Amino acid sequence: MSVSEFDTILFDAGGTIVYPDCQRIARLAGYVPEDAPARLARAWDPTMHAYDEMLLATGKHWQGDAGENMWLWFWNQTASFAGLPPLDEAAVGRIMESNAERSLWDQTTDEVRGLLAYLDGRYKLGVVSNSDGTVAAKLADVDLARWFSVGQLDRKSTRLNSSHLVI
């Protein structure tokens, strides 16, 4: 199948077109080094790789098992890859509480905007996300919404068809 046979590109939201606010994470974690936000940002890809590998190896649900603090594991993986001290449950609690109040994934890049501008008109663009239903607002907040039509998948549905998602 040639590339020209495709008319739609779907993006994951978090870590693909929107990124975590590493300034905010560093502050909430109590990290003092001035370069902590940049180190956390560089740690994102290796952390996600480790997370995906762990999920594949264990078969765990992406949010962890009941009673397990998957976020403690996740943020400590990030700290480790960033060369920063491990976080305790209180620090992870502050990060996750802040995320509940306002999503941490509220940053994008000029590279993302340039790519979407290039693809605009050539392909239909969509976003698939496992977030809490706030992706449309988040895309608007970071000025990416203009490239996407937004629909929402019914979480109770076990099948995805064209009536579930508007692109």
Image: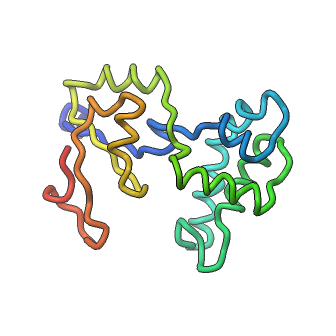
The percent coordinates of residue 90 (x first, y second) are 76, 60
Instruction: Pick whichever, 124 or 90, lies toward us.
Output: 90
Relative to 103, residue 115 above or below: above
Please identify the residue farthest to the front as the structure is shown: 101
Relative to 27, residue 158 above or below: below
Q: Quadrant of the N terminus?
A: top left
Instruction: Pick whichever, 16 or 144, lies toward us.
Output: 144
Taking the image as shown, residue 31 lies to the left or right of residue 23, namely right
Query: Residue at left 59%, top 80%?
Result: 66
Relative to 110, residue 32 above or below: below
Please identify the residue farthest to the left as the structure is shown: 163
Query: Residue at left 50%, top 38%?
Result: 106
Instruction: Pick whichever, 101 or 92, lies toward us.
Output: 101
The percent coordinates of residue 3 (x first, y second) are 26, 33
Taking the image as shown, residue 28 lies to the left or right of residue 85, namely left
Query: Residue at left 75%, top 55%?
Result: 91
